[in-house]
Amino acid sequence: MITGLAKVTVRFAETDAMGVVYHANYLPWFECARLDLISNVGLSYEKLIAEGYHLPVVEAHVNYKYPARFNDSVEIRAAIKERPTVKMKVEYEARCDGRLLVSGHTVHVFVDTEGRPVKPPKEWAQKLSKNFGKC
């Protein structure tokens, strides 16, 4: 399993009229944890793009359990639990003081500059796969 972590303090601008974090604001937090995960295995989106690949989100799911509020400290954990192929699923949990606020996942597909699905670059395949043992 590969993991990443992001810590955020809820800004007032991230809340809605009910005083809780607006539902869509969890997705950028997921991205922060996902970027940490990618960095933890020695990879970067910048290099991926420079090599002519992209990794768009093709599916996003968020399950809301409990709201975060202004000035809360939230930890978002990202994990890849299955060996990535052309698709990569990243799972998330966001917590405040240990309490689960949201869980969710995103699915990404490696594509070329024309948007066609492709196998991941060799470096990505090697670095991501080495965390899952042999099949």
Image (tube, rainbow, N blue to C red):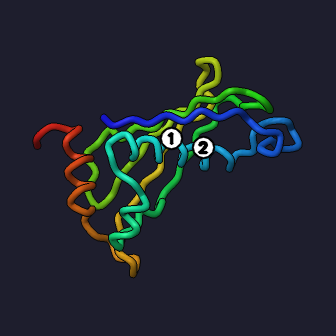
Give the amino acid at mark 2.
Trp
| Quadrant where the image shows the N terminus | top left
- Give the answer, above or below, for where 114 lies relative to 37: below
At a point 64% along the width and 29% down the height, the residue shown is 74
Q: Residue furthest right?
A: 17
At a point 80% along the width and 41% down the height, the residue shown is 15
In the image, residue 123 lies at what x, y percent? 23, 56
Secondary structure found at label 1 = helix
**Residue 29, which numbered label?**
2
Q: Is residue 101 left or right of residue 130?
A: right
Q: Residue furthest left?
A: 134
At a point 75% along the width and 45% down the height, the residue shown is 22
Give the amino acid at mark 1.
Ala
**Residue 131, which numbered label?**
none
Q: Are marks 2 and 1 in contact (CB under 8 Å)?
A: yes
**Residue 33, which numbered label?**
1
| Quadrant where the image shows the C terminus | top left
Nearest the viewer among 52 and 2 is 52
Counting every numbered tag in the picture gives 2
Q: CA distance from mark 2 to mark 1?
A: 7 Å
In the image, residue 14 lies at what x, y percent? 77, 44
Q: Residue furthest top?
A: 97
- Give the answer, above or below, for where 45 lies relative to 69: below
